[in-house]
Image (cartoon, helix red, strand yellow):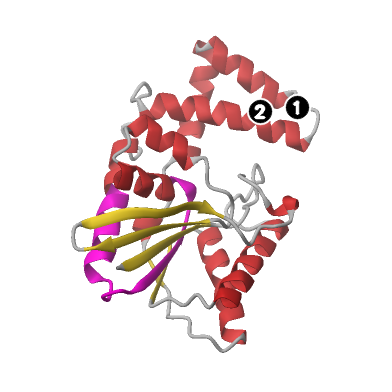
């Protein structure tokens, strides 16, 4: 059986002007992931990065520690299909109108703006983001110029299929990507409904990994949201 490991990127710079870079904590998360893998002797035949900066930074921190330890790290290949769904773009496009027309959204947005500290702002924004994403995934919002939730899942499924058909026999493949890609792949493996796939996409911890076994037509979940390396409570983040 071959093994596909999907890694969620380390913590990015949530709600900052430049979200798409690792925070200091995110860099530490990637570092301890590499240390853990080296300790247990994990090796990979192929390495893929999603196109975002946070994907590449996470992968390269792991790669640097492997190289320092003189353990083989294959030359990474960047695959645009492993990018996240268009959640930020949907928020930018839809939030202004929703604040005007939807009392529940208006209340959540006001709670976000009135947050007393950063942690409160994070929690309020999460509630706002998730409510709007549920509306978007169920096609209640009109965003024809953005990739739909359905098309996103199809994009990920096609890329996973390419990896499956080109991976070496009994190979070990790792992909550094985002929670949505992990959720979409899990949804495919477990035949989840679209809305359940969206919900599970929010469950992965930063720098956690999810593993799938595959051979021929078989594609089976092995582990989800594994984080044995994140033993310090400070390292356990979702955003």
Q: Is residue 180 left or right of residue 139?
A: right
Residue 171 forms part of the magenta stretch: yes
User: Can residue 69 be seen from the camera position used here?
Assistant: yes
Residue 203 versus residue 121 in the image, above or below: below
Residue 72 forms part of the magenta stretch: no
Task: Classify the position of the C terminus by image quarter.
Answer: top right
Q: Secondary structure at mark 1?
A: loop
| Residue range corresponding to the magenta coloring | 155-180
Q: Secondary structure at mark 2?
A: helix
Residue 34 versus residue 199 in the image, above or below: below
Q: Tag 2 or tag 1, which sits nearer the N-term? A: 1
Residue 105 in percent (x, y) is at: 55, 18
Which residue matches tag 2?
A: 124
Residue visible at 38% across and 23% down? 141
Residue 115 image label: 1
- The alpha-carbon separation of the residues under discs 1 and 2 comes to 7 Å
Mark 2 nearby-residue class (10 Å; few <14, some 14–19, many ≥20): some
Residue furthest right as drawn = 116
Residue 76 image label: none
């Amino acid at each position: 059986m071959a093994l596909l490991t999907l890694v969620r990127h380390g913590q990015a710079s949530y709600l900052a002007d430049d979200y798409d870079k690792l925070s200091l904590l995110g860099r530490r998360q990637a570092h301890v992931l590499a240390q853990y893998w080296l300790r247990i002797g994990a090796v990979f035949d192929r390495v893929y990065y999603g196109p975002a900066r946070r994907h590449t930074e996470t992968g390269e921190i792991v790669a640097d520690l492997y190289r320092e330890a003189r353990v083989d790290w294959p030359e990474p290949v960047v695959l645009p299909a492993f990018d996240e769904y268009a959640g930020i773009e949907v928020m930018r496009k839809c939030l202004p109108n929703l604040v005007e027309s939807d009392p529940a959204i208006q209340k959540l947005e006001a709670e976000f703006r009135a947050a007393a500290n950063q942690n409160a702002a994070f929690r309020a924004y999460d509630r706002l983001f998730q409510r709007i994403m549920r509306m978007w995934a169920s096609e209640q919002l009109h965003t024809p110029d953005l990739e739909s939730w359905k098309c996103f899942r199809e994009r990920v499924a096609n890329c996973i299929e390419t990896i499956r058909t080109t991976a070496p026999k009994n190979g070990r493949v790792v992909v550094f990507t985002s929670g949505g890609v992990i959720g979409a792949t899990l949804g495919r493996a477990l035949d989840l409904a679209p809305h359940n796939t969206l919900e599970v996409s929010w469950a992965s911890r930063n720098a956690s990994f999810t593993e799938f076994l595959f051979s021929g037509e078989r594609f089976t979940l092995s582990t989800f949201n594994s984080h044995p390396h994140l033993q310090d409570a400070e390292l356990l983040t979702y955003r």
